[in-house]
Amino acid sequence: MSPDLRQDFNMMEQKKRVTQILQSPAFKDELEGLIQEQQNKGNNPAGLLALRQIADFFMASSIAGFSTSPLSLAMVTPINDMFGTESTTLVKGEKQTRCKLASLYRLVDLFSWAHFPSSFVTVRVSKEQDHILIIPRGLSFAEASASNLVKVNIIGDVVDQGSTNLRIDHAGFSPHAAIYSMRPDVRCIIHIHTPATAAVSSMKCGILPISQESLILGDIAYYNYQGSLDDQEERVELQKALGPSTKVLVLRNHGVVALGETIEEAFHYIYTAQFACEIQVNAISCAGSPDNLIVLDLEKYKARTHGVAEAGVNMGSQHKWKVGELEFESLMRMLDNLGYRTGYAYRHPIVRDKPRHKSEVEIPATVTAFSFDDDEAATRLPFKLLQQRQQREKTRWLNSPNSYMKVNVGDSNGSSTQRARWSVLLHR
């Protein structure tokens, strides 16, 4: 290997080691510990801002193969804002759940579904203790982050206040608490009160089967919501209406609620319900009356369409995506590209390795694959083969072992004086 090529390989190895160190969790934890130590000293010590910028830069480096610009990092409030000692008090998986729920709030805001007094998104972070995460009243969905979410129990008592002094809206939380208490399979609930969902929830006909989106929703439950579910009798009525497996609930005159065993599934159903309601509102406004719409046969189409949506997405031999996971991951990439720093753990990278063609060089250009024993090459290149044989002979001669022998030689006068001479014998 030539010196230049050897130097290039050494530089590549050094860069690889540096990259591994910078991307390692241990380095990030060490950096966060150093930042925390500087913060404890107080008075904004010199270098703290630089350390924080470095930490934010490494956390923003792309997990899914994308990176964000420093300009966008300075303009967007990060979602993953829990560092070092802050995450040590969380239960297993809670930090990732907080990041996903805060990302979900950002998506609701970006899709213009946010409505402060009537939109709530919650997730159950612990089934054993029935702890639930929710955004406090007073924060906009655009401000949601992993640290400012409030953790409460099933009756609304605060377990972890988060990074703010704001309180939750108990009236808006009561339907979620009622659903969590009666449906142990549900982990995430999304309630939106957009113009389309509010309009359809006020129609006697409910969500009509006039589109593919309405069929994907499956069985839909309806409940006459009176503004609160604190009374036990009201909860019993809701339980009867909801049933054991329904994923979409229409609160009369109060919007739509989507339930999911995962955050991804709940978002899948609320996105589809919003789309179905928009289609229905536009169709009725054009047709003038629901009687003029073509209603699909539920027995013929509903089970098949809903079954296909429930089956998820099969990605060949790699793994199978559950309901909503593939689309939700693409939305997380969108947020990361916009600089939101979601902290989302991507399951599958989308950057495909380019296949190498057979004609491409697999070894460095300075290395030859020619063999001296190749008869076909000798037939094609006789002159070159002759040169190579001569070079072999020369190399073998130079590398032959040497032996030395002492020889006595007389002088010119024939005297008996002997002189010693070393003779070199080359054995081939």
Image: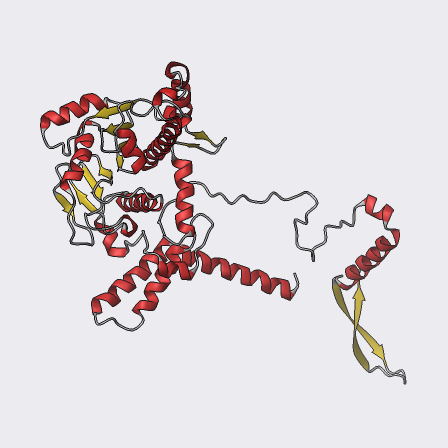
Left/right of residue 57 with respect to residue 11 in the rendered view: left
In the image, 360 versus 106, the foreground residue is 106
Left/right of residue 350 with respect to residue 416 in the rendered view: left
Q: Is residue 57 above or below residue 376?
A: below
Q: Position of residue 126 (x, y in %)?
A: 22, 38
Q: Position of residue 197 (x, y in %)?
A: 30, 33
Residue 346 in sight from this viewpoint = no
Q: Is residue 69 above or below residue 352?
A: below
Q: Position of residue 288 (x, y in %)?
A: 36, 26
Q: Quadrant of residue 201?
A: top left
Q: Position of residue 331 (x, y in %)?
A: 40, 43
Taking the view exactly as shown, the residue that stands out farthest to the bottom is: 413
Residue 407 in sight from this viewpoint = yes
Taking the view exactly as shown, the residue that stands out farthest to the right is: 413
Q: Quadrant of the C terminus?
A: bottom right
In the image, 305 versus 31, the foreground residue is 305
